[in-house]
Amino acid sequence: MILDPLTLLAFIPAGLALNLTPGADMMFCLGLGLRAGPRPAVAASAGIAAGGMVHVTLAGLGLGAMIAALPWAFDAIRWIGVAYLLWLAWNALRQCPQSSTVAPMRAARAFREGMVVNLTNPKVILFVLAFVPQFIDPAHAILPQFLIYGLVLALGGFVINGAVGVFAGGLGRSMATSPRFTRGLGLVSAAIFASLAARLALLQRS
């Protein structure tokens, strides 16, 4: 058996508690829900979950060793993420103030944006490398264990972040009755994305 059932049972509530902790992924879904509506927010949550699976796969394949050998890789990923979040903030500011509805967005684009935001957040890499190995049994294959634990985290995050995005999307859709409020939604979304960029820019590698 790849995983000890008792270890998996201990991991599930710990993972859900971490999913419930507000972070960059949750705030991104909140901002996107306000700006584009519930469906794109759910798609973005799915993209974030997919990005999380990429992280755990890379961690299982030895990403920690690469970061230790190439310290600049951490900063490169971090600054790419900062630039992308600032680009999203700029797009939110460009939202047309004359529109009386939230800005439309294709689900595929929202999925891609969510995945890129997750992949360019090195804090997720550090979290995966620090948290998941505590539950890994070195006597069994490492990568399958990372993938199983990653799937637990991805599913929990998808449900929770998606729910936050749906709530925000419903709020934005029901209240966006005037150009002024629509403009306000764009400003709030831009502020969220910009604050995430600032937080990421100040992140230090420990």
Image: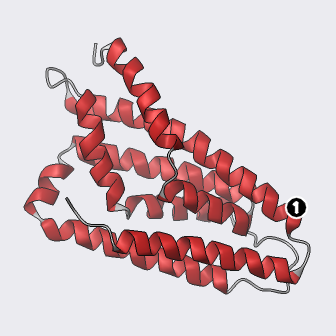
Judging from the image, the colouring scheme is secondary structure
Q: Is residue 201 above or below residue 117?
A: below
Q: Is residue 97 above or below residue 71?
A: below
Q: Quadrant of residue 148?
A: top left
| Residue 13 x/y as whole percent | 46, 27
| Residue 59 x/y as whole percent | 25, 45
Q: Is residue 105 above or below residue 157?
A: below
Q: How many numbered marks appear?
A: 1
Q: Quadrant of residue 103?
A: bottom right
Q: Which residue is mark 1?
A: 174
| Mark 1 residue crowding within 10 angstroms, few (<14) / some (14–19) / many (20+) | few
Decide which of 194, 56 is in the foreground and name it.
194
| Residue 131 x/y as whole percent | 29, 39
Residue extending farthest to the left is 69
| Residue 1 x/y as whole percent | 28, 12
Residue shown at the point (34%, 49%) measured from the top left = 55
- Give the amino acid type for the residue marked by disc 1 in the picture: Ser
Residue shown at the point (12%, 51%) measured from the top left = 65
- Taking the image as shown, residue 69 lies to the left or right of residue 28, namely left
- Taking the image as shown, residue 177 lies to the left or right of residue 92, namely right
Q: Quadrant of residue 192?
A: bottom right
The quadrant in which the C terminus is found is bottom left
Q: Secondary structure at mark 1?
A: helix
Residue shown at the point (48%, 69%) measured from the top left = 196
Q: Is residue 42 above or below residue 119?
A: above
- Taking the image as shown, residue 167 lies to the left or right of residue 139, namely right
Residue shown at the point (91%, 72%) measured from the top left = 177
